[in-house]
Amino acid sequence: MKLLHFFAAVLSALACAAPATASSLEAAEHKEAPQMQPLARMIDGPYEARESVVTPNTTLSRLSDLSVRIPSDTLTLSGLRQKAVVEFPMRRDEIIIRAQLHLNWTPSPSLIPMRSQLNLRLNGEFERTLPIHAEDLGKRVTTDIELDPKKLKDFNQLEFEFIGSYADVCENPVHRTLWLTIDRSSSLSLTRQKLRVADELAQLPAPFIDFADHQRINLPIVLPDTPTSNEIEAAGMTASWAGMLSDWRGAEFPVYFDEEPAESHFIAFMTEQHRPSFLKDRPSPQGPEVAIADAPHSPWAKMLIVAGRDEAELKTAARMLVLNTKLFSGSRSRVERAFEPHPRAPYDAPKWVDITRKIRLGDLTTYPLQLSSRGIEPPAIHVDMRLPPDLFLLTRSTIPFSLKYRFTAPDEDAAAMMTLRINNQITESVPLSAEKSAQAHASVRRIPLVDAFSTLLQEINVPSIYFNNANTVQFNFDYALSIAGGSPNDCRTVTLLEHQADIDPDSSFDFSGFYHFARMPNLALYAKSGYPFSIHADLSRTLAVLPAAPEPAEVSLRSRPDRRLLNSKIAPRTSFSSAKILSCSSTHRHQHLTTALRSRARQPTLLKGFSAALKCRSQFQPPPKLAVIQSTSKPTRHLRSSRPTAVQQQSSVLKPRSTGSVRSLPC
């Protein structure tokens, strides 16, 4: 009985509690939902309320422009060349939300339908098969393919594989009817969405320079209103670092005075008392500092801030950024100790070979397996070599070349040949035999520099000289294919084997004993490599001259890297020299003087300084080299310059003996 009373009490309590629970749920359901703020208001409103969302951008690229692996506009696949690859990048500060392939292709009319096909792979993963139908044979076929964006990464490869069949039995893989062409009008459409990346200096140079991006670098530089010479020098040092990293891409550096660039990453410079207005609320620097932060009026862009309590610390921060970016981490880092790098020696530009010792081919490579080639028809092996532009090659008629290589044995009764070309000129051809394929083949050759007979008939500048400033050494390993045709009654199965050839990295040229000689002035040498300004890789003997009150376009023209100096892989500058007033006392340490002029109207005052410098020739040994770079366009607020100046800084990693130390600071 007591137990029944207990259960009755429990049920009564539950019955009383049920209405309360229901009413609370009903209240929760009718609770007012949070207000959603429109995207436009979020972007235009307070900084904390913005989201990293921008309108996606769609680009259209031809397949023939996406990779250097395509030798011509039209891509042809055959029984021997069954595969082809095109490449396209994706920056770290964006994602590709849609990728569409527009393919125009034509199959051979002799193919067997359905048995022949075209396969597509994206980053090694199977994407789609395009069967060849009877109505497609010999006709142009248009196919639109949606690629899976989830498979994309920084570097992407799109592979085409042709599987062709023309007979039921006894097929020959080298038969002329086995072909499929992909037309030059084929294209890849990519829709990209910008992202806000984290504030992390350890990711430098990204996102300001992304090595996955093959486009020309455009990196604005922001200086305070009416910048001083030291602030311009700090910007010049940083521009040289960015130009060095841009390498073959090229770079532009639009300059803004106290103005934020629109929708772009940029680099800003500030001191305690002199800073751009949009950085007025930023905490005061505690010393030479480098920081990364969100751009104030962009939902995705970043700004790299180089700061110091005074102009000396500002230059120290820029110098340390140039010398060793890997020392920085976090969102804000301060330089605690800084050291001046040792002066660079003449002719030590990183892209120029050192002629004081033997030049190993292994030291000239830029990517792994560059000295190896593999395939049914092995592609050519290329090595680029740059010599100092004033190297006098006529003191000897030949140079020693120690060549070592290995190769797979050619087929029985099949010919094989190794051909050496220098600057696309045949230097030597060597037959390859099966007996010598087991061991490394080594030989020392004398590469002719000048055809002696033609030298008697022409001047020094003759095309018979094999070597010049920029050289390409090419090795071709060609194997003849011996394939029996067979017949339906006597069919012979053929399996094509890949061949491989390797050049020993210790193979070397010997340019020792040559002298530096060039008659000046010589604009041809300047056009090729920026000579004579490039004699010192850091341009430490070059003085740039600007007007007393330079405009943004003139500062940008001075900081813009020159393609001529890029050819020499100029090192970043750590002591950028510039002058607003030229005098004997300000130029006694510089052998080369240059100026960047925005318009003819600003010429006369500046050229008076040059006239004064010419009167000081007795203080120069030798006299200074003068170069005036000008533009006839009208001055504008932003950069619209036409030609680069001769003192632009560029390119290669400077390896200092002392790099100092950097400490990360809290945000």
Image (tube, rainbow, N blue to C red):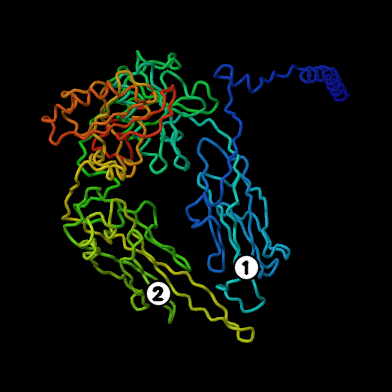
Residue 47 in view, yes or no:
yes
Q: In the picture, residue 195 is in which quadrant? A: top right
Task: Identify the residue under disc 1.
Answer: 164
Residue 107: % across, % down: 64, 63
Q: What residue type is labelled 2?
A: Ala
Residue 346: % across, % down: 20, 42
**Picture disc at residue 599:** none
Residue 273: % across, % down: 35, 13
Residue 652 in view, yes or no:
no
Residue 341: % across, % down: 23, 34
**Picture disc at residue 416:** 2
Are there few (<14), some (14-19), or many (20+) residues within 10 Å of tag 1? many
User: What is the residue that sits farthest to the left in this orientation?
Assistant: 618
Front residue of 343/589: it is 589
Front residue of 477/634: it is 634
Image quadrant in which the N terminus is located: top right
